[in-house]
Image (tube, helix red, strand yellow):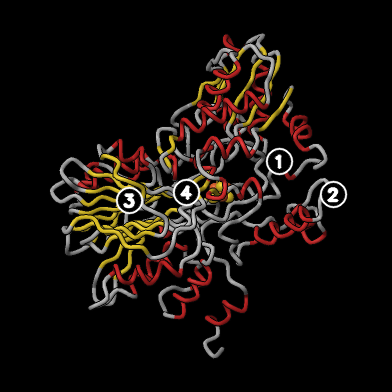
Amino acid sequence: MSVPVVPAGPYDDLGEPEPREECGVFGVWAPGEDVSKFTYYGLYALQHRGQEAAGIAVGNGDQIVVFKDLGLVSQVFDEQSLDALKGHIAIGHNRYTTAGGNSWENAQPMFRMAPDGTDIALGHNGNLVNHWELTMQAARQGLVDPKTHPSDSLVMCALLAADTREGHSAEEAAMELFPKVNGAFCVVFTDGDSLYAVRDPQGVRPLSIGQLEGGGYVVASETAALDIVGATFVRDVEPGELIVVNADGLRSRRFAPEKRSTCVFEYVYLARPDSVIRGQSVNTTRVTIGRKLAKEAPAEGDLVIPVPESGTPAAVGYAQESGIPFAQGLMKNAYVGRTFIEPSQSIRQLGIRLKLNPLREVIEGKSLVVVDDSIVRGNTQRALIKMLRDAGAAEVHVRIASPPVKWPCFYGIDFASPLELIANNVDQNDPVERIREDIGADSLAYVSAESMIEASGQPAESLCCACFDGHYPLGMPADDPNSELVKTMQAQQAQGSPADPNPLRQPEHQAELAGQAQPPRRSGRACASADELDEFTNPNN
Ligand code: SF4
């Protein structure tokens, strides 16, 4: 296994962090093709799903070679490293981690050797709900040390490899492991011979299959990545399905019945607009949301301008429906992202300006309808509105293409802690008006949950909308500090209107609110109770 030098950083995003996917996965089985380059371009197309680490594992039938490092795909790989990755099968991974979790060890693909000498490499998109339970299972088998807080992906890889042995293939090991895994998981893995793709029974995250002209197969987190490597879309990996691709072709096995809960936020913000999820174009969904928003929340304005890029399709829809002209009033630096160069304090203070710059000649003297995909903490919108007013905007009416985000995601998206979300930090008697005041807009409106769901083209009961409504279809991880906050919020909601403007401002959360003990943002790592850890600290227990 190649172990490249770990570079410095990365440093925090410039400006307010946006909600982030915690990974994109790609896999290819194509003898005779340059599989490492296919994977490179597949990961390049999925860069938006993870920008902190990238890796490729290539199998040639004898062994698997893994190359991974911190950084963007284009920073991690060059011609030389890709040329060294020769084989007929490859899997790739883009990772985003939260603070504290970004280390070379957590970059993927994960690698483990089975007792019979079989190499196993695995990449995972999503977050597991029973991460800790599986960690303890792996720890009891001596596969991981729980005190090092192994990631859920490493735990799955370790369990899979440990159960792969003479007469019990990786495929059989997977058929036994994945029914015990609870949470969001799109997994690609290889034993060096076959390519495997697995999707959780709820199908929370997308995963699709494509075919190459030469007959090889590709799996990718989004259909846009299939398009970009020249693969023809075959179908989605079904929830609860294990796909096997090898010299015998493509086979399907079911390890659990389907119980759909597709992430609605993939449609709203996370996925590329040129991807298709469950047969529905992401771009069409966003344009439709914009149209519905214009009907639900009309505004008097001279121009509709998007907050690029994710607000653009909804702004197009808003302009189409309202008849107000569409214009690009903000220019985005397309190359801004995670940076490995630490910004100076004076550069940091520029904040949002490093990402977005207003076009003064377009917006000066105009009443603007500004369309964005979501509001998380509100810092971006506050800075944006001030920037537009400074550039001469007469009025700024903000329209948001999703309902207020109030709840954390346990299934693979990193939002702020519920304590930091602006929708939880204003008077709950008239929250939208309070948020409007806070961000300094002339008017503010969110699209309704019903319209967002309708625009996705999927039945409401087959979607996860937990970050908007607090109903968690896969449950919550017992070891995540945000689970306790959510229970408090749910109890408040059940009692009706909270007495306190902030539903979290309960005595037990005073320390967090004072900033003394903010619950950590989830990083795909398990937390142990003292007793559980003690089991491994003291062998006599
Ligand atoms: S909580 Fe929100 S972001 Fe997370 S899976 Fe559900 S809809 Fe998607």
Task: Please determine whether, in this image, residue 338 is positioned above or below residue 300.
Answer: below
Residues under labels 2 and 1: Cα distance?
15 Å
Nearer to us in this view, 9 or 488: 488
Task: Please determine whether, in this image, residue 311 is positioned above or below residue 254.
Answer: above
**Quarter occupied by the C terminus:** bottom right
In the picture provided, is 21 more to the left or to the right than 303? left
**Quarter occupied by the N terminus:** bottom left
Where is residue 348, by image quadrant?
top right
Specify which label sits upstream in the sequence, 3 or 1.
Answer: 3
Name which residue lies at 44% across and 40% down: 48
Amino acid type, residue under disc 3 in the picture:
Gly
Where is residue 530, by image quadrant?
bottom right
Bin the neighbour count of mark 1 within 10 Å (Cα to Cα): few under 14, some 14-19, many 20 and up.
many
Query: Under tag 3, what secondary structure?
Result: strand
Task: Report the label total.
Answer: 4
Residues under labels 2 and 4: Cα distance?
35 Å
| Residue linked to disc 4 | 96
Residues under labels 4 and 3: Cα distance?
14 Å
Bin the neighbour count of mark 3 within 10 Å (Cα to Cα): few under 14, some 14-19, many 20 and up.
many
Query: Under tag 2, what secondary structure?
Result: loop
Residues under labels 4 and 1: Cα distance?
23 Å
Is residue 7 visible in the rendered image? The answer is no
Name which residue lies at 48% across and 71% down: 134
| Residue linked to disc 1 | 422
| Residue linked to disc 2 | 500
